[in-house]
Image (cartoon, rainbow, N blue to C red):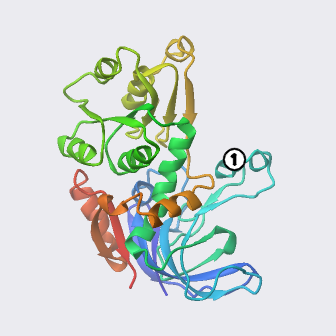
Amino acid sequence: MKVIRVVTPNSIKIENDPMPKIEAKDDVILKVKSAGICGSDVSIFGGTSPVATYPRVIGHEFAGEIIELGEDVQNLKIGDHVTTNPVFNCGVCRICQKGRGNVCANLKVMGVHLDGGYREYVKVPSKNIFKLDPTLSWEKAAVIEAYTVAAQVVDRGGIEKDDIVLICGSGQIALTILQVCNIIGAKCIMTDIIEDRLKKATEFGAAHVINSKNEDVVSKVKELTNGIGADVAIDAACVGVSLKQAALGVRPAGVVVTMGFHDAVAQISEFTITSRELDIRGSRLNNNKFPEIIKWFQEDKLDPTKIITHHFHFTDIEKAFAQIKKDPENTMKIILDFD
């Protein structure tokens, strides 16, 4: 079978690997049908990921059809359409026992620490498999994982109906967060330096947009909130200054959620946090968000096609990455087709 492997940073190849085989009683083998390209896939390819190891078959957003099952697998059958939670935790460490398996002490993620889903066939434990309505398109199925990340961010922020949420950035992940906030009934203020992205944020339902290149984000947020600030601020831009804008743009006793993996230091004083008793919370991957997102997809409460801008056959992976590099402003979610 063919696989997409990042051999070393900036070196990606289509290679031939043996077909996976059922080894454990709970194994499930899928024929991959579609996959999404995430920013973390791009960073692994470019050598900027602080957590990936090489060589690595990348890809953690993927969906497929079951072709083989281990003897103990129940509630699944050959031919089922499914998606996969790429997060593997031990279940026994102190962190897992606290219900936070997405940051398990022994965490492994497909496509990062383990070989991922950019291959024609993949083997996954049944506990990581989620069944889908067969009427759900493969392109939609491919991006379910991306929305679980957004749902995790919203959960970590404790966002509720009528909350005012400042989302720094209006790129792909920010727009998925906006869509989840819309379902909950929160009102979102979006920032960016690119007008086309702000236009897209408005189309997606943002209450207000701010061009941070032309306006002071903190002053504008205060103006829009009667001088108080947002209830929750999310740093989805992850460019250093955006975290500072989030911390200063949130109200006293507010929550700031960060999701960046950059090593650059963000300049936020202790006074900024302590004087207003802010909660600063990280958000990573997802913690049991698949059932909720799948339900929203299948009820048409979420429309993921809004963020899908390009399709490539998986063997054209180099062209897909070139598209991202060539036109990052207008390239959001790329779907890799495996049929």
Res. 58 visible in picture? no
* Above-or-below relation of 27 to 210: below
Q: Which element is circle 1 on?
A: loop
Q: Quadrant of residue 242?
A: top left
Judged left or right of residue 319, residue 72 is: right
* Above-or-below relation of 69 to 272: below
Residue at (57% x, 60% y) in the render = 290
The amino acid pointed to by label 1 is Arg
* Above-or-below relation of 145 to 339: above
Residue 175 horizontal/vertical position (percent): 35, 48
Q: How many marks?
A: 1
Residue at (51% x, 55% y) in the render = 148
Residue at (80% x, 45% y) in the render = 94
Judged left or right of residue 101, residue 116 is: left
Q: What residue is shown with label 1?
A: 100
Judged left or right of residue 226, residue 1 is: right
Q: Quadrant of residue 192?
A: top left
The one of 94 and 56 positioned closer to us in this rendering: 94
Residue 178 horizontal/vertical position (percent): 38, 45
What is the quadrant of the C terminus in the image? bottom left
Residue 120 horizontal/vertical position (percent): 48, 83
Q: Mark 1: give few (<14), some (14-19) or many (20+) Cα within 10 Å.
A: some
Residue 220 horizontal/vertical position (percent): 28, 21
The one of 339 and 319 positioned closer to us in this rendering: 339
The one of 109 and 62 positioned closer to us in this rendering: 62
Residue at (21% x, 41% y) in the render = 194
Res. 180 visible in picture? yes
